[in-house]
Image: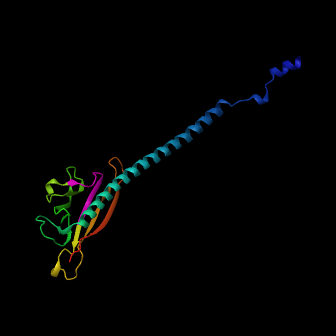
Amino acid sequence: MKETLQRKKSPNIHERGFTLVEMIVAVGLFAVVMLVSTATLLSLVSANRKSQSLQSVMNNLNIALDGMVRSIRMGTDYHCGGPPYSEAMDCEEGTILAFKALSGDTWIYWFAEDENGIGRIYKSETGSADDGIAVTAPDVVIDNLEFYAVGTARGAADPAHIQPKVVIVLKGTAGARDARTSTTFAIQATAVQRVLDL
C-alpha cells in the first residue's frame, strides 16, 4: 500500500504539457506567419482588381477602334479637315475624318477634350460636330489622334489607281479611375475602302 501512495505522489514523466513560454512563442510565430500571408493575399487581390479594370478599359478601346475601322472601310469620299465635307481629299495628317457612309449620310470622327479635360474620340452620323457622341470611355485618355488619307482622287487625277485608304494613329493612356498606375499605348490601324474605286 505504501508503494501505491508513493506512485500517486511522484510526478509521472509522461503527463507533462507545454509551458507558458512555449505557448507564447508558438502563438507569436503563428501570428507573424498569418500577418505575412494576409498581406500577400490582399496585395494579390488588389493587383487582380487593377488588372481586370485595365482589361475592361482596353476592351472598350478595341471595340471603339474596330467600329471606327469597319465604318471607314465601308465608306467613301474620305476627307480630313474642316467643313465642308462635300469632296474627297487626301491629307497627310488631321484630327478630323469625314466620309460618306453606306446610307449616304456624312459621318465624322474626331478628337476633342470633354468637359473634364479628358481627350476622347467622338462620332457623328449627321455630318455635324454639334451632335457627336463619345465612343471611348472616360478611363481611356486619348493624347493624340491623327488620320492620314491617301488615294481619294478618282480617274485621271489618280493615275496609279491607288485604292483609297485611311491610316489611324492613336496614342494615349489607360487606367482605372482609382488605380495608381496607368498604361500607355500607341495603336495604328488601316482601313482600305471596300468599294472599288475606278
Q: Is residue 57 visible?
A: yes
Total count of labels: 0
In the rendered structure, does residue 12 fall within the stretch colored magenta? no
Q: Position of residue 156 (x, y in %)?
A: 16, 82
What is the magenta segment's predominant secondary structure? strand
Q: Quadrant of the C terminus?
A: bottom left
Position above or below: 69 against 21: below
> Which residues, given as a range, are shown in magenta?
133-146
Image point 58% across, 36% down: which residue?
28
Q: Position of residue 14 (x, y in %)?
A: 77, 30
**Front-most of residues 198 and 128:** 198
Q: Position of residue 139 (x, y in %)?
A: 30, 51
Q: Is residue 97 visible?
A: no
Color style of the picture: rainbow
Q: Is residue 142 left or right of residue 15?
A: left
Looking at the image, the residue that sits furthest to the top is: 1
Q: Is residue 85 left or right of residue 149?
A: left
Q: Quadrant of the N terminus?
A: top right
Quarter where residue 106 is shown: bottom left
Quarter where residue 111 is shown: bottom left
Position above or below: 53 against 154: above
In the rendered structure, does residue 141 fall within the stretch colored magenta? yes
Q: Position of residue 109 (x, y in %)?
A: 21, 61
Looking at the image, the residue that sits furthest to the left is: 84
Q: Is residue 113 left or right of residue 182?
A: left
**Front-most of residues 148 and 119:** 148
Image point 80% across, 20% down: which residue?
9
